[in-house]
Image: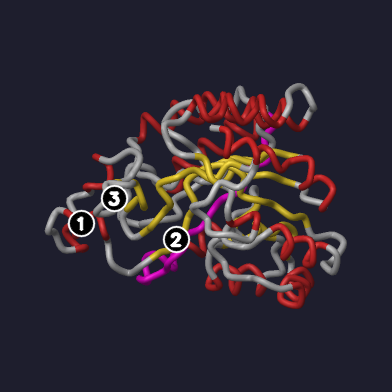
Amino acid sequence: MKISLGPIYFYWSKQQVFDFYQQIAQSSVDVVYLGEVVCSKRHELRLDDWLQIAQQLSAAGKEVVLSTLTLIEADSELKRLKKICNNQNYGVEANDFSAINLLTKDCTPFVIGPSVNVYNTASLNYLAKQGLRRWCYPVELSKDTLLDIVNNKHNALEVEVFAYGQLPLAFSARCFTARAYDLPKDDCQYKCIDHQQGMLLSTKEDQSFLIMNGIQTLSSDVQNLVCELDEMKKIGVDVIRISPQVESTNQIIDVFRDRIDQKNTSQEAFNILAQLSDNKQRDGYWHNQEGMKGVTLAVEQL
């Protein structure tokens, strides 16, 4: 089982991003997804910068995949999408069907990210014939649904599961961060960069609920499926995905690597991860319950 590192969802400075991936180059991660997937107005890094990082990671032995925007709203964004899809050196993660359309026209092998709503075997097998080689399972579906799909999928199709991080729940044409500052979306003043982990939204009872991140909504709690890795192996999961964190990403990768290699127990791995984050650990969706629930023994003991 391989470990992947998903794209950075938050808006970080250029130097912070470069420093982050210098550390990742030394990690045990196998696959790295690079690029802006949330908002094209985030201009700290241009495509050439991402390609420079890609070269460094490739030299370190990582498989690099360029990720596309999840919501295409302008011609300029479509032009950038075409450049990414037409690159000759790296794989592409399609995060919407405009990217899938471009890639299938050129018969280019591609990956589907968790934001693309593909929920059944028939759709997957059709896309596999069009060039799909790896599919990241939608975060809101359960292990039972995954098992049913895996048992009937195209044999060559790899399966990836979002195993750790704030869950990417929704995207909107409205920018929630700009709205919080009473600014129009077209004049947002790039406020996202002031919130390296997004803006926390709490309930009236002062319970953490969601993270507002520009046009994206994430869970405030962290999905943590480290206790489920043995079962994932049995199901046939090929890759588990970790979402980049402001702190401790390399340590998180190491914990998952040790669990895959049977160097720690599920309980030990879970306890370490719980100490590395102030966020509550959840696995409800995986168990066909509300995503906010933690239903494994390790979670209940926390």
Magenta span contains residue 71: yes
Q: In which image quadrant can residue 286 be found?
A: bottom right
- Say if 249 sits above or below 216 in the image: above
| Position in image of residue 112 (x %, y %) | 63, 61
Question: Which residue is labeled 1 in the image?
Answer: 178
Question: Which residue is at 53% across, 72% downward?
Answer: 98
Question: Which residue is labeled 2 in the image?
Answer: 80
The earlier-in-sequence mark between 3 and 2 is 2
Q: In which image quadrant can residue 158 be found?
A: bottom right
Span highlighted in magenta in the image: 61-79
Question: Which residue is labeled 3 in the image?
Answer: 202
Q: Nearer the viewer, residue 17 or 263?
A: 263
* Quadrant housing the C terminus: top right
Question: Which residue is at 64% across, 25% downward?
Answer: 254
The earlier-in-sequence mark between 2 and 1 is 2
Report the number of discs. Answer: 3
State whether residue 86 appears in this view.
no
| Position in image of residue 215 (x %, y %) | 33, 60
Magenta span contains residue 123: no
Secondary element type, mark 1 = helix
- Say if 175 sits above or below 26 in the image: below
Disc 2 marks a residue whose amino acid type is Arg
Secondary element type, mark 2 = helix
Q: Nearer the viewer, residue 167 or 203?
A: 203
* Quadrant housing the N terminus: top right
Disc 3 marks a residue whose amino acid type is Ser
Residues tagged 3 and 2 counted as in contact (Cβ below 8 A): no
Disc 1 marks a residue whose amino acid type is Ala
